[in-house]
Image (cartoon, coloured by chain):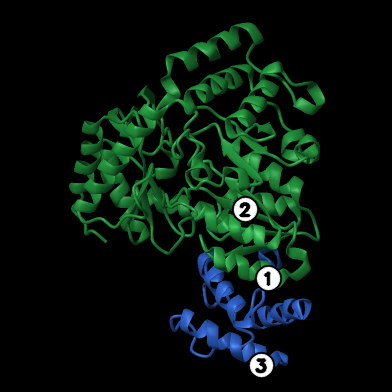
């Protein structure tokens, strides 16, 4: 699975949670910025992401994540460790 | 000096509350009249938001013990136990806590918050993983931060979800610290401890249970959800606080591990803070002696909790959990919840209001903590205040 695949799957997870705030979600879309996800929403997102990719992402790894693309990179890193 | 931009978000919330003329986070109780009554804004007010579960704050024996310690040992210890010495009472309390729980040893911390900080950061470090319930108290999250370990959340009260995450850890699952709470403070719901114990055992994980809101309240001798669920012997570490049912301040951990001997020396929140004053230790020891035999208080607390729960349910309110010492009313959107809280205060009832993201969902909560010291008439008055809310039952 390459980076674009991860981003595409992530967009599919994020879109129904975004409640139409952003019409076209891309790798550059900000999670806490444009999408205005608060900490509860980010937690729900991460639980869904973890189930989808069968990984566990440490809370402390999320501190520097701003965009969908950055989260995709983190998922790839964590999935690599699990493999 | 210019305002610190880091405080901008907090300042905005304070400004919003000031505009509304409602300040639930700065409530001042001008005078405490009884464990369940105080003077707020010049009005006699029923206190239903204080976590004084057994109503022991005015217990005559406890006050007597504190007074005697004050007279004989002075106001404070003026230092850390490691650097400046323990008083005999500190160690005696640790032994008594361990005996009460049937555990090998105990450690006393200066607050419940520090007990979680101190235990988690001593048991885990960089390169380790700590698994915590997603709805954990801030002290558990902060303990994880202080530890430097990777922190992984599992779904609230979901032992199968914990199992899934332990499985993903592979060989590293053995020895991983898992932290749950007996009763969750926001909604008052209990953890399925039997299930958590089974999953932790399956993977060789270490289980720590924070019984802050269940000590004194649940279990035949008041030893919390672990006692109620029959797993007291199978939980590795139990953490708790003196600031709720024991009516004082302070925290502790008890456990059977051989590490209990050295844990305190590896715990910065234990080492680098002042120890509890003699009066606090003496009063807590006295209150602890009462706890095991407080069947009558626990019975009264149960009856009060059931009365409040049934009364609010009958009024059409949605409640957070089954009857327990914490009865939480789901109160919808933030502004409405703040106005509801203010209405209750003006009716002479003080409860807690919790707003997202401090709540487990995007709903606000009006959280009542029930006391054994509440009279049935006070419980009915709390229900009547809720009934008088002109807004919608959300």
What's the chain of the residue with tag 2? B
**The label number, if any, that marks residue B179 in the structure image:** 2
Q: Residue at x 32, y 55 (%)?
A: B319
Is any atom of residue A32 visible in this view? no
Question: Is B178 located above or below residue B288 in the figure?
Answer: below
Name the residue tied to disc 1: B167
Q: Position of residue B262 (x, y in %)?
A: 80, 37
Q: Quadrant of residue B53?
A: top left
Q: Find the distance from the CA under tag 3 to the CA under tag 1.
A: 25 Å
In the rendered structure, the answer to whether residue B241 lies left or right of residue B85 reads left
Is any atom of residue B281 visible in this view? yes
Q: Position of residue A51 (x, y in %)?
A: 59, 78
Q: Find the distance from the CA under tag 2 to the CA under tag 1.
A: 17 Å
- Quadrant of the frame with the C terminus of chain B: bottom left
Name the residue tied to disc 3: A5
What's the chain of the residue with tag 1? B
Disc 2 crowd, CA 10 A, few/some/many (<14, 14-19, 20+): many
Q: Residue at x 62, y 47 (%)?
A: B235
User: Which is nearer the N-term, disc 2 or disc 1?
Assistant: 1
């Amino acid at each position: 699975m390459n980076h674009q695949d991860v981003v595409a799957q992530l967009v599919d997870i994020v879109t129904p949670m975004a409640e139409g705030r952003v019409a076209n979600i891309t790798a550059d879309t900000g999670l806490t910025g444009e999408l205005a996800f608060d900490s509860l929403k980010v937690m729900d997102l991460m639980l869904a992401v973890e189930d989808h990719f069968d990984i566990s992402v440490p809370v402390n790894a999320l501190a520097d994540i701003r965009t969908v693309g950055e989260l995709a990179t983190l998922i790839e890193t964590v999935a690599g460790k699990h493999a | 000096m210019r305002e610190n931009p880091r405080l901008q978000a907090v300042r905005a919330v304070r400004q919003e509350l000031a505009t509304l003329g409602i300040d639930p986070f700065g409530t001042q109780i001008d005078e405490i009249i009884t464990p369940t009554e105080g003077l707020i804004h010049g009005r006699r007010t029923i206190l239903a938001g204080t976590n004084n579960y057994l109503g022991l704050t005015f217990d005559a024996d406890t006050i007597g013990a504190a007074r005697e310690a004050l007279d004989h040992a002075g106001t404070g210890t003026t230092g850390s136990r490691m650097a400046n010495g323990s008083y005999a009472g500190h160690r005696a309390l640790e032994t008594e806590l361990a005996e009460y729980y049937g555990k090998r040893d105990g450690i006393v911390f200066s607050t419940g918050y520090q007990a979680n900080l101190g235990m988690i950061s001593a048991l885990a470090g960089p390169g380790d993983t700590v698994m915590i319930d997603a709805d954990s108290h801030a002290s558990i999250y902060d303990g994880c931060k202080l530890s430097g370990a990777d922190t992984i959340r599992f779904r609230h009260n979901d032992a199968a979800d914990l199992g899934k995450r332990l499985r993903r850890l592979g060989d590293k699952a053995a020895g991983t610290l898992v932290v749950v709470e007996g009763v969750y403070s926001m909604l008052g719901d209990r953890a399925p401890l039997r299930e958590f114990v089974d999953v932790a055992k399956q993977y060789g994980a270490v289980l720590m249970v924070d019984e802050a809101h269940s000590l004194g309240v649940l279990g035949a001798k008041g030893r919390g959800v672990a006692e109620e669920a029959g797993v007291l012997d199978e939980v590795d570490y139990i953490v708790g606080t003196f600031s709720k049912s024991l009516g004082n301040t302070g925290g502790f951990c008890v456990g059977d591990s051989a590490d209990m001997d050295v844990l305190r020396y590896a715990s910065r929140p234990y080492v680098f803070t002042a120890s509890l004053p003699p009066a606090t230790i003496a009063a807590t020891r006295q209150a602890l002696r009462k706890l095991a035999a407080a069947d009558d208080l626990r019975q009264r607390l149960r009856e009060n909790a059931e009365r409040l729960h049934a009364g609010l349910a009958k009024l059409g309110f949605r409640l957070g959990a089954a009857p327990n010492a914490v009865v939480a009313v789901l109160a919808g959107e933030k502004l409405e919840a703040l106005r509801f809280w203010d209405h209750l205060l003006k009716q002479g009832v003080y409860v807690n209001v919790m707003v997202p993201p401090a709540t487990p969902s995007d709903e606000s909560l009006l959280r009542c903590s029930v006391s054994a010291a509440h009279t049935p008439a006070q419980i009915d008055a709390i229900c009547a205040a809720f009934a008088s809310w002109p807004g919608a039952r959300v």
